[in-house]
Image: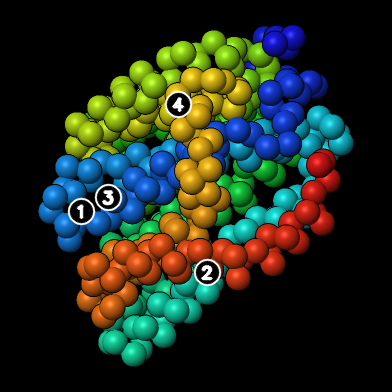
Amino acid sequence: MGVTKQWNIFSDITHVPAVLNQKVYPSLNGIRALSVLGVVISHMTTHYQFLKGMLFMGYLGVNTFFVLSGFLITSLCIREKVVSKDISLKNFYIRRALRILPVAYLYILVVVILSAIFNLGVSKLNVLSSALFAANFNYFHKAHFDPDLGHFWTLAVEEQFYLMFPILLKKNFKVFVSFILFILFVVPVIIYLQDNNLLYEEGLAYALPHYLIKFQAISAGCLLSVLCFKGHLDLGKWKPYRSGILIIIILIVKYDRFTYTTVAIWNNLFISAMTGLVIVNSIYKSSDLLFKFLNFKLIALIGVLSYSIYIWQQLFVSGDGIFPISVYPYNLLFLVTIPCLSYYFYEKPFLNLKSRFVKVK
């Protein structure tokens, strides 16, 4: 690969490996497609019993999105910092806003209107927390998640990641790496000690580690990016084993208990690491079946639409009984058409503006 290894993980990165300097990373849209399909199928298990055994796919899909986000955002920010000697936070946040906000706020508006018309009882607290990307804090207030807005907790975690991690990366690379290592390896220990009554577990002392642990999968993606830039991971070495790694991940997730115990936290760390290996080894061009599948045009298209699908799918699979949008089989038609219409006729103009705020092409 021709990458000089930088053994000090805390030292500034000065080189961009060729595979991370591509204009477009292959396979990532395919991975997005599998992730969003997993979420949709998982959400449909509540109403379609024949899919009950696929419930685990929702967790795996969201976790993969988080790892991918951590890896991709960190890689793009590091590349910009190496090439231009700085990271434009202004441009970064404008690009993220153009991608995230338009369809998110449109969806919230639609939910509010439908709630008023069909008396769905969507709470003002959940509307407000979703609009402010703070829905993950509802856990601490024991608030009920309205089905139509339940998925906004993941967007909240993503947005808070954008607010913290790039700033640390810009200001001090050593602090950035220390922060992600703290989340990955120290926070689980703190939670373990609290669960066993060996540490204080009230108020902020309890809330802070349980808040930070939501960034575990994202932090795993961040660390994998750093290791790749520093040459500690041979990106092509694991290519032949990607399919096997995927099977291992699926089996572990399928038989996990979906709890927030210490064991589940360490399981999630392992799953995130394995997912990261699949991601970083999939951006190498290959002739194997997995690479061809991830880059198949239809799969790649679903990946391009994945954010739109993720936002809108909740309305069609939440089971509110709004005829015809959430009633089988009509909901499947809406599940396909609405994200496409949203992306091509509403989101695309905003996305086209992003190129104006790219410092490193």
Mark 3 to mark 1 CA distance (whole Å): 5 Å
The picture places residue 162, in percent across and down from the top left corner, at 61, 49
Q: Residue at x 78, y 37 (%)?
A: 80
Tell me the amino acid under the disc marked 3: Ser
Against 33, is 349 above or below? below
Check disc 4 and give the amino acid type: Leu
Looking at the rendered image, the quarter that the C terminus falls into is top right
Q: Which residue position holds label 2?
A: 341
Give the left or right position of residue 302, taking residue 176 as reference.
left
Lower position in the chain sequence, tag 4 or tag 2:
4
User: Gap in Å between the C-alphas at discs 1 and 4?
Assistant: 27 Å
Q: Are marks 3 and 1 in contact (CB under 8 Å)?
A: yes
In the rendered view, how is the structure colored?
rainbow
Q: Give me the disc on residue 42.
A: 3
Type of the residue with mark 2: Leu
Frontmost residue, 206 versus 129: 129
Q: Give, as a three-letter code, the residue at label 1.
A: Thr
Residue 45, which numbered label?
1
Q: Nearer the viewer, residue 190 or 236?
A: 236
Tell me where residue 33 appears, x and y as whole percent: 45, 45
Going from N to C along the chain, the mark reached first, 2 or 1, is 1
State if disc 3 and disc 4 touch (CB < 8 Å). no
Please tell me in which quadrant of the rendered image residue 235 appears.
Answer: top right
Q: Position of residue 175 (x, y in %)?
A: 66, 31
Identify the mark at residue 290; answer none if there is no mark. Answer: 4
Q: Residues within 10 Å of mark 2 (few under 14, many from 20)?
A: few
Q: Is residue 85 above or below residue 140?
A: above
Q: Are marks 2 and 3 in contact (CB under 8 Å)?
A: no
- Of circles 4 and 3, the one toward us is 4
**Circle 1 SS class:** loop
Mark 4 crowdedness (10 Å alpha carbons): few <14, some 14-19, many ≥20: some
| Extreme-bottom residue of the structure | 117
